[in-house]
Amino acid sequence: MSAAVDDELWSAIGDPTRRRLLDLLLADGSGTATGLSERLPVTRQAVAKHLAVLGRAGLVRAMPAGRERRYRVDEEQLARAIAQLSAVGAAWDARLRRIKRIAEAIQQERDQHRDRETQ
Amino acid sequence: MEYGSIEREIYVEAAPEVVFEVVSRPEHIAQWWSDEASFEPAPGAVGELVWGEREHVAAIEVVKAEPPRLFAFRWGHIGEDPLLVTFELTPSGTGTTLRLTETGFREMGWEAAKLEEMYRDHVSGWDHYVPRLGEYVTRLVSAS
C-alpha cells in the first residue's frame, strides 16, 4: 500500500537549494536570509523565497531578529518528512523479502519433486 | 518534470521462471502485497488490487509482460497519479537477481531512494552538505 505523503512537504524538500538551506540551518542552529545567502551561490532574494516555501511546509520557523527574521528548522516536521520517505522504501523492502521467500519455497518444492522423479 | 524513483535489488535462490510467476501472477501478488489481486498478467490488461474489505482499492494496468525477464505495471489509488513499477529479472548463478524500480513518484523532482540512503548510511549523495544532514537524521531516528 502506498504511504500517505504530504505533497507540499515533498515538494519543499525536493529542491537542492532548499536542502542546502536546511542543512546550513541544522549545522548553525539558525540563520537569516542575508547570512545564508553569503554562504550559497544565490541572492538574498532567492534565499528569502526558498525560506518562505520551507516555512509554508512547516520545515522552518521564523522569529523576528532586528530588521530581519531568523529561521530555525522545525525538527519534528523534518523527522516526519524523513519517516514518510523511508516508509515508502521500507514497504518495498518488505514486499521484496516476501517475493524472495515465496519464490524460494516454490523452487524448493519443484526441486524436491524432480529429485523424487529421478530416483 | 523530473520524476522521483525507488530502486531495489534482491537475490532470489530460484529460477527466473519461478520469480517471474511470483511477481506477475495475481494469486502470488495477493500473498506479497495486496489482500486480493485480480488482473490478467498480459500487456494492456486492467484490474484491481484490494486491501481489507475494499477499504483501499488501487487500479493496476499491465504494461509489459516478457517472461521470464521483464514485468511492468502501473498502479495507483483512485485520484492519485499512477506509479510505474518495473521488475527486471536476470539469471545469476543458480538463482535470479530481481531488480525493482518504481517511478513517477509524486512527480516532485525528488529521489526518495537518495534521502533514504542518507538516512541509513550517512552516504554523501548530493554534495558535501549531505553527511551532516545524514548524521542529524540518524540522531533523530535513534532518539525516537
Image (cartoon, coloured by chain):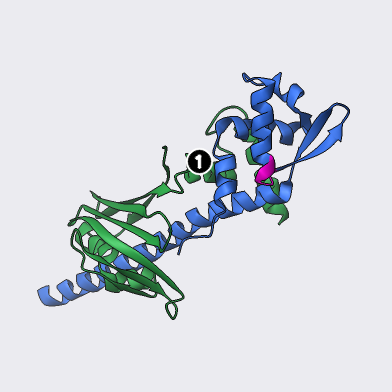
Chain colours: A blue, B green
Disc 1 packing (10 Å; few <14; some 14–19; many ≥20): some
Image quarter where the N terminus of chain B lies is top left
Say which residue appears at 41% left-offset and 64% top-offset. B78
A23 horizontally vs A65: left or right = left
Q: Give percent across and percent down for residue A69.
A: 81, 32
Q: Is residue B13 visible?
A: yes
Total numbered labels: 1
| Subunit ID for the residue under disc 1 | B
Q: Quadrant of residue B21?
A: bottom left
Q: Is residue A56 magenta?
A: yes
Q: Position of residue A103 (x, y in %)?
A: 30, 66
Q: Is residue B41 above or below residue A68?
A: below
| B115 and B62: which is toward the camera | B62
Which residue does the image show at 39% across and 66% down from the upper left? A98
Indicate the secondary structure of the residue bearing disc 1: helix
Q: Nearer the viewer, residue A2 or A50?
A: A50
Residue placed most toward the observer, A24 or B15: A24
Residue type at the position of mark 1: Lys
Q: Which residue is mark 1?
A: B114
x and y percentages locating residue A4 in the rendered image: 53, 59
Is the residue B49 above or below the residue B20 in the image? Answer: below
Residue A67 lies left or right of residue A118; in this view the side is: right
Q: Which residues are magenta?
A: A55-59
Residue placed furthest toward the right: A66
Give the main secondary structure of the magenta stretch: loop
Position of A87 relative to B136 (above/below): below
